[in-house]
Amino acid sequence: MAKFQFVDISQRRYSRDREPNECPICHFSVQANEIDWVLTSSNGNRRTPDGLECVYQCPRPECNSFFVARYTRSDVDIPNTGLAGIAPGLREFVLHELVPSTPKKPHIPDEVTNTSPLFPEIYTQAIAAETYGLNQIAGGGYRKAVEFLIKDYCIFINKDAENEIKSSYLATCINKFVDSPQVKICAERAAWLGNDEIHYERRWTDKDISNLKELIILMMNWIQSSVLTHKYAKDMPKEGK
């Protein structure tokens, strides 16, 4: 039998799927302190609520932030549980979002930051835009982050071509100056998906911003490996060289 969590409001019982297990402000796993509940209705009719909202407080002394858990009514009816106060056909409320929330600070390897000093700021701002629901802007931010990261990487390994790299299209830089096969594979595809985020029509209709973010993480990992490889090749040349 499915397990339900119940909340009592105005002497009536409602079901929710789960409680929040992470503070959206400090991003630590917590068992938040429940403060109060309220029913909401998108059509203004409180007799047919389609939302629940609960105020919580983070229990961590370093945070103590208040936040709201928003639940929306699901399309699945709760079976007759035999519990008092549970009306037949009552629908469960599903956790939808936690507000306000702050973007998680991304992990960026030092080798990536040193290679592309502006990339972390652009990348972090794109994450913030997505966190705040600015999905039409976030994709363009990720696309800009890709260009800065790849061009700075190309300059790192081709210092004599810096001016040419700065003035070239991103695709040209990838094809002409990226030496690592792994970086090139990820960079090409990140550029394609990034272009979809800023152009009127999408070419890769079966891919979305989550795939673009995955490719950016792969690029950071491969670039870190490439930068370290160049470093050790330079610091420890073959004997007789």
Image (tube, rainbow, N blue to C red):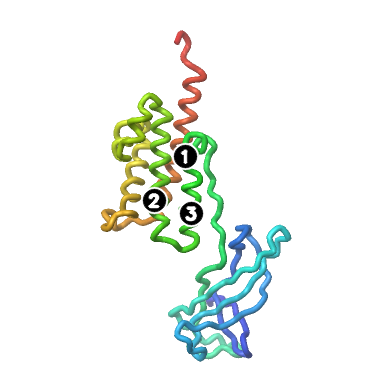
Question: Which residue occupies the foreground of this view, 95 or 87?
Answer: 95
Q: Residue at x 36, y 56 (%)?
A: 208
The relative height of residue 93 versus residue 47 in the rendered view (above or below) is: above
Q: Nearer the viewer, residue 151 or 189?
A: 151
Q: Residue 127 carries which label?
A: 3
Task: Point out the frontmost of discs 2 and 3.
Answer: 3
The residue at 61%/62% (across/down) is 23
Q: Which mark is residue 212?
A: 2
- Contact between marks 1 and 2 (CB within 8 A): the answer is no
Q: Which residue is drawn at 48% across and 87% down?
A: 44
Kind of residue at badge 1:
Asn
Residue placed under numbered mark 1 in the picture: 221
Q: Does 17 sit left or right of 203 as displayed? A: right
Question: Residue 230's spot in the image, x, y percent?
Answer: 46, 26
Q: For the C terminus, which image quadrant?
A: top left
Q: Give the quarter of the image for residue 68.
A: bottom right
Q: What element carries label 1?
A: helix
Q: Is residue 11 left or right of residue 140?
A: right
**In the image, is residue 133 above or below residue 72?**
above
Helix, strand, or loop for circle 2? helix
Res. 187 image quadrant: top left
**Amino acid type shown at disc 2:** Leu
